[in-house]
Image (spheres, coloured by chain):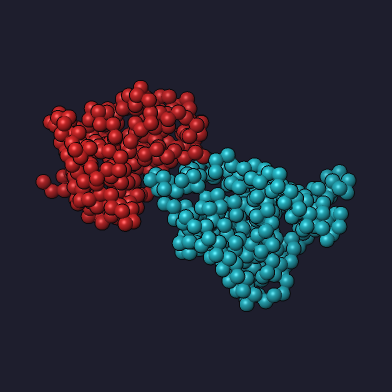
Amino acid sequence: MEWLNTLLQGMLLGGLYAMFAVGLSLMFGIMRLVNIAHGDFIVLASYLALMVVNHLGFSPLASLVIVVPVMFCLGYLLQRGLLNRTLGQDILPPLLVTFGLSIIVQNVLLQFFSADSQKLSQGDLEVASVGFGSLNVGIMPLMVFASALLIIGGLQLLFYKTALGRAFRATSDDQQTARLMGVNNAHIFGLAMALAMAVVSIAGVFLAIRTSFDPTVGPARLLYGFEAVIIGGLGSLWGTLAGGVILGIAQALGAKIDPGWQILAGHLVFLLILVVRPRGLFPRSVD
Amino acid sequence: MTTQTHLLAIDRLCAGYGDFQALFDISLTLDEGETVAVIGSNGAGKSTFLRSLAGQIKNQASAITFRGQPIGDLAANQVIARGIALVPEGRKLFPSLTVEENLQIGGYSKRPGPWTLARIYQLFPVLEKLRKRPGTALSGGQQQMVAIGRGLMANPHLLLCDEISLGLAPTTIKDIYAALPSIKADGTTVILVEQDINQALSVCDRFYCLQEGRVSLTGRPGDVDKAQIKAAYFGV
């Protein structure tokens, strides 16, 4: 039963990793942009939430009402004002620019918030749990996982049931021809980044409730996000969820064997899947 | 006549790719409802001409006047909003989109007009049964029907067709060209770019022959003889 509990905790943690990964998957899928600053944007969202909580007296979850729209707008402006200029045949400029952004975000956070660890407190909700037989499951992890399901389900609907979603997919297939259909690529890319940042901000707030954070924890979140995307297969949203869950379970099982093995077990499973299925578990058929 | 009275007026259009110039001083006019063929051998500049019209190659604004407005410097997504749709060479359907979605995205610019999904299925009935299939899982001829339908879904004043018979069986080409009268019936003006001279001349009101980026011959199909066309086409 103890092992079953570990499995379940790992799976729920996977929901958070999937949220880290969805933004990466969106950006790469639609505009072939690898965003090295992704993890730092997660942490930026955590600090934004911290500010809203401290100054406006909101609870961390209520701060999403402000953090999500702010990050959405920031994403759109960042893409239109800066990142669109780096996109082209060469994959290197966006890598370098987002790497630079990562350093800038970390240092700005360090300047304004110091290197002290911070944490958001959601009060009793953090320790509340529901019982399933002899298993007790925390309400917060359940909420995180449910949010991941809702986000991915919502994005799936957006992509496959709306005109905007068709434009996203068409742009992902062939930017030149999508323009011929009247699609303004610069705007579509802006919206893709804005959506990615909106998801990032939810992930950032959940992260900040779950664990302590400081300005330098971004790159590790980026790594978990990358691993989840690659395990799941590039371009598949549900695959990304599966990737997050596999990574979460691997880490939880690793930690169960020995607390020092938590991160290592995740990386090992990632490597193993990369060797066996280099394109991930659910690759998109058209690439 | 002033340019205002023409649907499209092209004035000394020059275009190319980087240092390579593919078109030299092309001038022509087009009136509403006409079907004009642009013929020429490989490398004559036909596709460059259509890509310039569709906004894929930018030009001086005044080089292309459409419905009285200069549009030569507009981007492709702005050109289609004005009512010029391109059916590109090689069809270029979106592989992740189904047949129906490929058609729907043709109407992305939301221009009002007679063309709807139902009308496209009426024009090409075979597509209705295949509408849930991925666009690129169809035969070449069916894909070409989707590409034309996608262009029509923009409800364009001017439809540009680039080599729509290329690589297709003769019977399929016949089926596709059979749709042309219905397209024209709604007042849509058509520019056909073709290597197949006979096919193009059999359906057009006027033609322009390009050779090495310049207009080498123009006229009505009945007014010129084969020897003249041959000379203008091959430059012999």
Q: Position of residue A180 (x, y in %)?
A: 38, 45
> What color does chain B have in the rendering?
red
Tell which residue pokes out farthest to the top in this image: B171
Q: Is residue B96 left or right of residue A177?
A: right
Q: Residue at x 19, y 38 (%)?
A: B236
Count of marks overlaid on the render: 0
Q: Quadrant of residue B231?
A: top left
Pick whichever, B3 or A59, lies toward us.
B3
Q: Residue at x 78, y 54 (%)?
A: A265
Tell which residue pokes out farthest to the left in this image: B1
Residue A151 against residue B115 in the figure, above or below: below
Q: Position of residue A79 (x, y in %)?
A: 49, 60
Residue B190 against residue A147 in the figure, above or below: above
Q: Position of residue A190 (x, y in %)?
A: 49, 56
Q: Position of residue B52 (x, y in %)?
A: 30, 48
State whether residue A40 appears in this view.
yes
Tell which residue pokes out farthest to the front in this image: B236
Q: Quadrant of residue B227?
A: top left
Q: Residue at x 66, y 64 (%)?
A: A218
* Chain that is coloured cyan in the picture: A
Q: Residue at x 56, y 68 (%)?
A: A100
State whether residue B33 appears in this view.
no
